[in-house]
Amino acid sequence: MGYVFDPEHLEEVTNRHLDEPLQIAFDGITADLAASYPGNIRTKPRRWILNNAGGAMGQICLIHGSLSEYLLFFGTPIGTEGHSGRYPTRVWDFMIKGEVWAYVEGTFERTVSKPGVNAMDLPRGVAKGYRAFEDSWMLEYARGPIPTMLPFGLWDTLFGTLDFVTLGRTILQYGQLATDQIFKGKL
C-alpha cells in the first residue's frame, strides 16, 4: 500500500509552528502540508467536529482522509482522558500545544509528551491509556486500513452520547475526503 505522508516530515512541519498562537499554527501547518503534499490536504473550510472515543472527548478537524491514511488536528480546551484504541494501523501524534501523559499495559511509569515531541507513536495492535491536559492540541496521522478504526471512533457517539449530528458530520467529512482520494487514484 503506497503512503503519501512521511511521519518525520509531519513532525518537522508541526515543530515549525509551535511558538505561534493556536489558530495561526493550524493555518501554518495546513498551508505547509498543502505545499508539501499538493492535492492531498483540505485547506478550507476548517470544520471542527466533537469526537467521543474510548471514553475521551475532544474535537477533530480532518485535513486528509483516505482508505489508507488520515491526517487531522485533535485537541481539547478543557482536558480529557481515555483509551487510545487498539488498531491494525499505526498512529502518530505530534504535539502543538499542551501536555499528554500515556502508559501501556505492564508499565508503571507514564510517558510525558509536550510540544515538539512525538506524543504517541502507537504501533499496530498496541493500546495506551492517555490523559490530555487542558489546552492540548496535536496533529494526528494514521496509516493502514483506516476503515477498521471507524467502529472504535464512532461507538461512543453512536451508543453513548447519541449525538447523531456529530456522527453524521464525521461520516460525511471522512466519506467526502476518502471519495475524493479514490477519484484521484489513491486508496
Image (tube, rainbow, N blue to C red):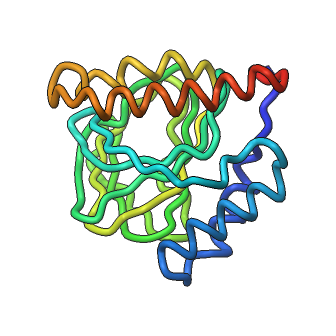
* Residue 83 picture location, percent across and down: 29, 36
What is the quadrant of residue 20 in the picture? Answer: bottom right
- Residue drawn 79% across the image and 37% down it: 4
Quarter of the image that includes the C terminus: top right
Tell me which corner region of the image, top left, top right, bottom left or bottom right, holds residue 52.
Answer: top left
Camera-side residue of 134 and 174: 174
In this rendering, would 24 be left or right of 35? left
Quarter in which the N terminus is drawn: top right
Residue placed at 54% from the left, 33% from the top?
123
Q: In the displayed structure, does residue 156 sit left or right of residue 5? A: left
Residue displayed at 83% across by 59% down: 35
Task: Judge whether 56 appears above or below 134 on screen.
Answer: above
Identify which residue is drawn at 60% across, 18% down. 145
Please, is residue 36 above or below residue 19 in the view?
A: above
Q: Where, by quadrant of the figure, is residue 56 drawn?
A: top left
Residue 67 image point, x, y percent: 65, 21
Residue toward you, 184 or 99: 184
- Counting from the top left corner in percent of width and height, residue 64 is at 64, 40
**Is residue 119 positioned above or below 141 on the image?**
below
Query: Residue 41 location in percent, x, y?
Result: 71, 47
Please tell me how many numbered marks the rendered image carries.
0
